[in-house]
Image (cartoon, helix red, strand yellow):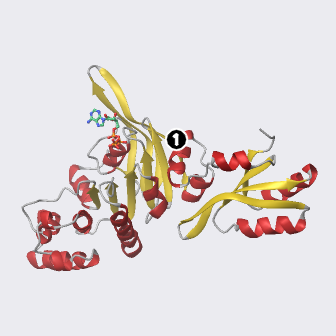
Amino acid sequence: MIRFDQVTKSFDHEGTSFKAVNQVDLEVQKGEIFGVIGFSGAGKSTLVRLVNQLERPSSGKVLIDGQDMSQVSSGKLRSIRRGIGMIFQHFNLLETKTVFHNVAFPLTLAGAPKRKVKERVNEILEFVGLSDRANHYPDQLSGGQKQRVGIARALATSPSILLCDEATSALDPETTKSILNLLKKVRDEYNITILIITHEMNVIKEICDRVAVMEDGKVVEAGSIFNLFSQPKHPTTQKFVQTVMNDEIPKSILDQVETRYIYRVTFTDGSASQPVLSNVAKQFDLEVNVLYGQITELQDSPFGNLIVEFQGDDDEIQRALEYIKQQVIIQEVKSDGR
Ligand SMILES: Nc1ncnc2c1ncn2[C@@H]1O[C@H](COP(=O)(O)OP(=O)(O)OP(=O)(O)O)[C@@H](O)[C@H]1O
């Protein structure tokens, strides 16, 4: 549905050319919630602005439903743009207009008749839970309510794509959660493709199906949430994962452990590590101790790491490791003393 094909966007500054987006290949499927994460300056905003052609690629193609955006007529581009909604970190509401008129704005702009506008605005305000705030002004609303208005405005013209540029970065954690739940509802009920850019791994973890990690204009790693969280390969991905899954074994615990065999066992979708470990304890002549761990939820399934130590005969431990490897992800933390 959205395809970046070798897309580069360069900016010229004081005689030098700078690639804000550098040869990006990505495909976002219809109805998917796709996250793009990266530190400040990685090129996320530029990437998202390439989707609705607020920026034009210097080279490569951006395709929406198979259509090369650089090849369409200006009339066609306007109609494609109406099918792409966008929400922003600072909401970008019209302060002098009521909630109703903020949401009505894109419909009025598109020339919709008054009766249709009223019907659609009321419907969408109900969807975002703000029917009782229709006559309020933005400065009478909380941050979370303002973003609900932003979402309602973006949805007013019934888009098929919703772009979210740091949409929860100005909100507290509770409000962030409620906005993310609303975005999930947008996807589930309207089958809208959602492209989220953020610097917060929590946002990715909460609602995305797949994620791309950006650095210096490039996508350094991309994949399903499970793959990225369970086996992050690039150092930047590893840093982001650690912000929500701190699985570094505390030094105080490591110092107390005398054994040589310490491993990280990772829970992934459908793999229940705990039964595997109790089977190991039953089937092999060794002791298994859980030293540390953190289990969370990823897309409604348990996910996390357990740091375990094995005590026993070397050969028996090797046999047990072979058995475990066939069932779950296991990585060595320490196996050779200090
Ligand atoms: N119009 C522009 N002209 C010149 N340079 C630009 C322009 N837009 C973006 N850049 C540069 O491109 C790089 C990527 O910027 P971009 O805003 O896409 O990154 P980002 O990952 O969204 O960062 P942030 O999270 O801070 O917004 C930055 O170094 C920025 O200064």
Q: Is residue 204 left or right of residue 58?
A: right
Task: Please state which of residues 319 and 172 is positioned toward the viewer in this rendering.
Answer: 172
Residue 8 horizontal/vertical position (percent) = 40, 36
Considering only vertical position in the picture, is 42 above or below 270?
above
Q: Position of residue 318 (x, y in %)?
A: 88, 51
Residue 64 appears in view: no
Label 1 Cα neighbours within 10 Å, binned few <14 / some 14-19 / many ≥20: some
Q: Quadrant of residue 107?
A: bottom left
- Seen from the viewer's position, the closer of residues 83 and 232 is 232
Residue at 89% in and 67% down: 283
The number of numbered badges drawn on the structure is 1
At numbered mark 1, what does the secondary structure look like: helix, strand or loop?
helix
| Quadrant of the image containing the N terminus | bottom left
Residue 80 drawn at (x, y percent): 28, 57
* 180, 16: nearer the viewer: 180
Instruction: Please tell me which residue is depicted at 93% across the width and 51% down the height of the picture.
Output: 315
Q: In the rendered image, which quarter is residue 43 located in? A: top left
Q: Quadrant of ligand 1?
A: top left
CB at mark 1 closer than 8 A to ligand 1?
Answer: no
**Is residue 129 among what the camera can see?**
yes
The residue that mark 1 highlights is: 236
Quadrant the C terminus occupies: top right
Name the residue furthest top.
15
Q: Is residue 191 left or right of residue 223?
A: left
Task: Tell me the quarter of the picture where residue 60 sits.
Answer: top left
Q: Position of residue 312 (x, y in %)?
A: 89, 55
Image point (50%, 50%), residue name: 243
